[in-house]
Amino acid sequence: MLRVVRRCAAVGLWRAAAVRPVHRAVCLSVDPQSGLADEKLHVRVQGLSPRDAVTLRAVVVDEQGCLFDSCAHYAADSSGSVDLHRDASLGGDYTGVLPMGLLWSLSPSVMEKPYQRLEKKSVYKSPMVVEVLVHEGHTRPKALPGAVLAKTKCERLFIAPGVRRIRLREGAVRGSLFLPPGQGTFPGVIDMFGDDGGLVEYRSSLLASRGFAAMALPYFAFEDLPPAMTEFHLEYFEEAVNFLSRHPKTKGTSVGVIGTGKGADLALSMATYLPKVLAAVSISGCCANTAAPLSYRDVTIPALMYNMSRVKISETAVFDVSEALDDPLDPANSQCLVPIEKAEGSFMFIVGEDDLNWKSSIYAKAAVSRLQENGKKNYNLQSYPGAGHRIDPPCNPFSPVAVDRVLGVPILGGGELKAHCQAQEDSWQKIQEFFRTHLE
């Protein structure tokens, strides 16, 4: 009931802003009006008076009914137009020429709890709908805006037409398999996320939309999988690799793997011990096995652990966990390191140099040094200044602080809006190129 009241109040604010009659024929266009979520938008306004001050806003209601919004201030040119590919925002949630700034800066509205992350849950049921509005005058973020001069909606698709989603219960393996349309075979990629657990599908569905047979692979806190990270058995991940490599829609007999956070060090272990894994992408990961012991046959890699006494809490109750993880480069923790020099496949490390969740940039450089010391050249390091921890596909807004689903508290992730979101755009293209190079 409270959610309904909050939503009604929020809608009332937007309607209240539109009661003032406007006699201009202002035209707002968003192109494409329906497209994949990793595509750029082109937003234009025409029919204003020269030098008119306007506020552009984006509004999204997620699947839980939470309202996210953003705003930016613009001034019309001499012809009465605003083009976000050309014109700089003068204020609001961002400044400068950022064509995707309205999407990048979406954050919980004043009606919602702070630090919630806008993340697509049900990629196959419906697209994300973004309403874009042009308001009269310049109004500060989260404040009641001026009269609505024009508005339109666009759809952000997380799954392309024709992509098939197959829920998996194959032996011990759980998850979802996304298959591109067409009669051909496709490079196979296993996709894993971090210690939030559960099934996360939005990256896999986008990979399939770009021509990959992509498996979203949960490894705890989903269906009959273990409820928490207490121990890992690489045989589970091996079973997933075998299933995907043998699938009739997968090209060849080898697969790739991509992981974020805890999923990243699992990706390194898979590439090290499982010969069918020829390409591994580690996003904001560690060079050691973290959180729980990992066993495979007669080998066990101990867990690099966390010391919660090193967590700092700000005056705004944001948790800084950047020092909580034990140092993987301390000789005392050498047994926790993943012996990636044994791998025959190739690695791509993607890190933000302003990652404040943990020291992923240092960990990636250490992994590269370990490969170099063993005469290996099978690596690619993409290190992005100004980027924070959660480097997602370019559809996702920037969240320098986000609520951790397990701990239930806001965790500092770091980064700066423009640099982080540009890193997401650049790395997304490089990830696809990397997999196509090594899995074709």
Image (cartoon, helix red, strand yellow):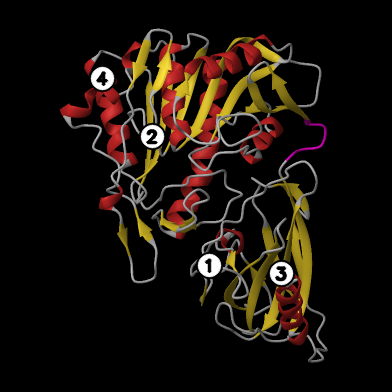
Image coordinates of residue 215 in percent, x first then y, are 64, 26
Mark in front: 4 vs 3: 3
List the residue tagged with mark 1: 114
Amino acid carrying label 3: it is Arg
Q: Amino acid at mark 4?
A: Gln
Q: Which of the two discs, 2 and 3, labels the residue nearer the N terminus?
A: 3
Q: Which residue is mark 2?
A: 291
- Mark nearer the N terminus (4 vs 3): 3
**Closer-to-camera residue (247/169):** 169
Q: Disc 2 to disc 4, how far (Cα)?
A: 27 Å
Start-end of magenta stretch: 159-164
The residue at the far bottom in this view is: 20
Structural distance between the alpha carbons of marks 4 and 1? 44 Å
Q: Gap in Å between the C-alphas at discs 3 and 1?
A: 15 Å
N-terminal-most mark, 3 or 1: 3
> Which amino acid type corresponds to the residue marked 2 in the rendered image?
Ala
Q: Amino acid at mark 1?
A: Pro
Give the camera-side residue of 196 and 203: 196
> Does the stretch in magenta take in 162?
yes
Task: From the top left corner, tell me how far across and down residue 41 is, in percent.
Answer: 67, 55
| Residue nearer the viewer, 56 or 194 | 194
Helix or strand or loop: what does disc 3 sit on? helix
Determine the image quadrant of residue 293: top left
Disc 1 crowd, CA 10 A, few/some/many (<14, 14-19, 20+) = some
Look at 59% across and 14% down and name the residue there: 239
Q: Which label is found at residue 372?
A: 4
Q: Tag 2's secondary structure?
A: loop
